[in-house]
Amino acid sequence: MMYFRRKQSQNHVEDDDSHKAEKVSELRAALGSLSGRSLKYCTDSCLRRYLVARNWNVNKARKMLEESIKWRASYKPEEIRWPEVAHEGETGKVSRANFFDRFGRTVLIMRPGKQNTASPEGNIRHLVYIIENSILNLREGQEQMSWLIDFTGWTLNTNIPVRTARDIINILQSHYPERLAVAFLYNPPRFFEAFYKALKYFMDPKTSEKVKFVYPKDKGSIELMRTFFDVENLPSEFGGKATLKYDHEEFSGLMTEDDIKTAAFWGTDDKPQNVLNGHSTVEVAPEPLALVSPAR
């Protein structure tokens, strides 16, 4: 009997996988002919993410993906280069961590208390650049990332406007579906709750379920963080034992190297620039690098 049940369960999984594969094929057929970067973007795994975001409804996933294709053709996120957004990153308000979570996912560290500009478009382009960069640096077989948001120093004066936050949420939900695994809001002040309620109105349920409020003196929060992160890697700002130090010049060097990989991957014929203290200097003619960098 146990063998029969196990075989039945295995058949169910296989049937489900086969059904999902058929949905991917249906979506690809529904999209019609694609070329250039749109074709490169629409991998099978990409199509699956849009299908998951729309509960495997092919027609809804097609509409969503077509909007993303239009957005990418207009906004050109793959053409943003570090010299364009480096000034937004001078304080380290958003950066890619040099460690992964326990599931091998890329980690983004956000420190809204270090907000340094008042440009809505600048903030958005900087974040889009970091997200694209994080996707480029995903480990093989991994498609999602984790966010760690440190509220140290955050005040209403350093807060971005609700409208900008709404635009960011819209871009993330509409054009980067199923890229976010979890977002930890670490030790937010009490008055942030009112701001979050305003933001939650613009979130779909799937996104809001991934947002976790965690507090340093709460036992459940500590256990949750340790479920996702090794405390030896986790910065002390998030209850771990590591030191979080953002070196803008060093990070700029890494981003400049990754700009070369981005250009090679998307076929953009540009020459990434050296960046020193957030300002571009001379152009370089680099040797091609591997498309996926090793874990740093």
Image (spheres, helix red, strand yellow):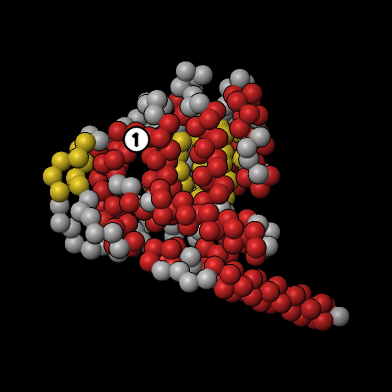
Report the residue at 19% width, 45% height from top: 274
Residue at label 1? 89
Dot 1: element: helix
Question: Percent from the top left, x then y, of residue 101?
Answer: 50, 50
Residue occupying the point 64% across, 23% down = 194
At x 50%, y 54%, the residue is 68
Quadrant location of the N terminus in the rendered image: bottom right
Q: Residue furthest left?
A: 282
Q: Nearer the viewer, residue 237 or 46?
A: 46
Q: Is residue 163 above or below residue 64?
A: above
- Horizontal relation, residue 71 to residue 91: left or right: right
Q: How far across and how far down the image is residue 230, in percent?
A: 51, 46
Whether residue 97 appears in this view of the structure is no
- Amino acid bearing label 1: Gly
Q: Nearer the viewer, residue 78 or 75?
A: 75
Q: Position of residue 205 (x, y in %)?
A: 68, 44
Above or below for 263 versus 164 = below
Residue 158 point in image, percent of width and height? 45, 22
Compare residues 159 and 254 and report the one nearer the observer: 159
Q: Is residue 33 above or below residue 260?
A: below
